[in-house]
Amino acid sequence: MNQRIVLVGVVAALLAVLALSFAGGIFVARMGTPDGRPRISDTATVVTQIQTLSHLVTVKYVFEKVVVLDDVKWYGQNRLLMIAHGVVKAGVDLSKVTAADVTITGDRISLKLPRPLVMDTYLDEAKTEVLERSTGILRTYDQQMEQEARRQALEAIRKAARASGILKDAEERTRLQLTTLAHAAGFTSVEISFR
């Protein structure tokens, strides 16, 4: 009986020490930051590259594309269904404009610009999602299916943008924006053409 009381006393003492150690650890950890969150050291921000961007992006198209990939073998089928949310941007590369492309006579300005082109095509990852992914019983999961679906979606979205007239829209909006800018700069006559 006496040993049992001593054993219970030792276990209670150990539990008390562990509880105090745990509470002390939390107290010490919270002492480092006032709100108890992990501390983030402020390190230097280093510029690794500076580039001059001379692209005038004037139009953005947003598309949705459903991509279905089926890989059927005699021993099973892998299937992927994705809704891809894509963005296509078009505009003019102003770095190709030379002094010979700009003619100023009094309050008249004439600009010859390169033809618009597709500047960027990408999937909006926040809105692109895989709705269904299934793997046959005797098949292994194919990691490349999702990458292939994304590649096909980008290609289809790029083609759809061209077919929808993104380059014509980019030309019209470039003309409008540069005409507005030239008028604000004091030119009364603005002529913009594309070569």
Image (cartoon, rainbow, N blue to C red):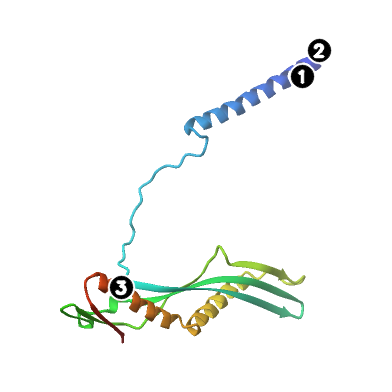
Q: How far apart are the alpha carbons under marks 3 and 1?
A: 88 Å
Is residue 20 positioned above or below 140 on the image? above
Label 2 belongs to which residue? 2
Residue that badge 3 annotates: 180
Q: Amino acid at mark 1?
A: Val
Q: What mark, if any, has residue 8 been given in the picture?
A: 1
Q: What distance separates the C-alpha of mark 1 from that of mark 2?
A: 10 Å
Point 72% across, 19% down: residue: 10
Q: Give the farthest residue toward the front.
A: 188
Q: Residue furthest bottom?
A: 195
Q: Position of residue 25 (x, y in %)?
A: 56, 29
Rendering quarter of residue 85: bottom right
SS at badge 3: helix
Quadrant of the rendered image containing residue 153: bottom right
Camera-nearest residue between 65 and 47? 65
Q: Could you tell me which residue is drawn at 28 percent across and 71 percent down?
A: 181
Q: Is residue 88 left or right of residue 191?
A: right
Relative to 98, residue 137 above or below: above
Q: Amino acid at mark 3?
A: Thr
Say which of marks 3 and 1 sits in front. Answer: 3
Residue 108, percent across and down? 20, 80
- Mark 1 vs 2, N-terminal side: 2
Query: Mark 1–mark 2 contact, CB under 8 Å?
Result: no
* Label 1: how many Cα within 10 Å (few below 14, some 14–19, many 20+): few
User: Which quarter of the image is occupied by the N terminus?
Assistant: top right
Q: What residue is drawn where x is 30% and y is 76%?
A: 179
